[in-house]
Amino acid sequence: MSAKYEIFSGKNGQYYFRLKAGNGEVILSGEGYVSKSGCQNGIESVKKNAGDEKNYEHLTAKNGAPYFTLKAANHQVIGQSEMYSSVQARDKGIASVVKNGPTADVVDLTE
């Protein structure tokens, strides 16, 4: 199985996307969008910015769990990872988004 973006709708009626690695794990999630076209634009921004490691911010949650965000050229956060068990696991997650983010297919689960 190859990496893919999934577009889905939340209980609040907004559209969201998630990038799943080839193993089915979610490696990046987007914010809520009012319109599907806004969500699709978010995916395009991730595809454009995912390949450059300088766009990633390495962070640590209050509970000590490492995670990361992906930022666009305007420094706005366009995606966030899950919480990881270690810095090494987080860094593998970033490497996976760098590799898969620019070319992953989009699957629309709202249709």
Image (tube, helix red, strand yellow):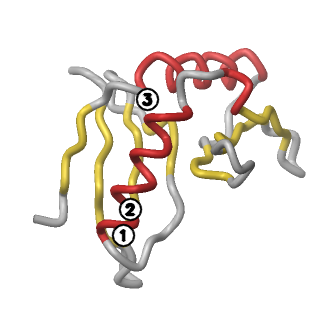
Q: Which residue is pictured at 69% across the width and 42% down the height?
A: 69
Q: Amino acid at mark 3?
A: Gly
- Estimate the spatial distance between the alpha carbons at disc 3 and disc 2, rounded to whole Å: 15 Å
Asked whether, in this view, residue 65 is left or right of residue 30, the answer is right
Nearer the N terminus, badge 3 or badge 2?
2
Q: Which residue is mark 3?
A: 101
Q: Which residue is mark 2?
A: 39
Looking at the figure, which quarter contains the C terminus?
Answer: bottom left
Image position of 56 with respect to 9: above or below: above
- Estimate the spatial distance between the alpha carbons at disc 1 and disc 3, rounded to whole Å: 19 Å
Q: Which residue is pictured at 19% across the width and 54% down the height?
A: 108
Q: Amino acid at mark 2?
A: Cys
Q: Position of residue 106 (x, y in %)?
A: 24, 42
SS of the residue under disc 3: loop
Q: Position of residue 97 (x, y in %)?
A: 51, 26
Looking at the figure, which quarter contains the N terminus?
Answer: top left
SS of the residue under disc 1: strand
Asked whether, in this view, residue 91 is left or right of residue 26, the answer is right
Nearer the N terminus, badge 1 or badge 3?
1
Residue 51, quarter of the rendered image? top right
SS of the residue under disc 2: helix
**Which is nearer the eye, 43 or 3?**
43
Image position of 48 with respect to 29: above or below: above
Q: Position of residue 71 (x, y in %)?
A: 67, 43
Contact between labelled residues 2 and 3, with CB atoms less than 8 Å apart: no
Q: Amino acid at mark 1?
A: Tyr
Nearer the N terminus, badge 2 or badge 1?
1
Contact between labelled residues 1 and 2, with CB atoms less than 8 Å apart: yes
- Estimate the spatial distance between the alpha carbons at disc 2 and disc 1, rounded to whole Å: 6 Å
Q: Position of residue 46 (x, y in %)?
A: 49, 41
Q: Which residue is mark 1?
A: 15
Image position of 110 with respect to 52: above or below: below
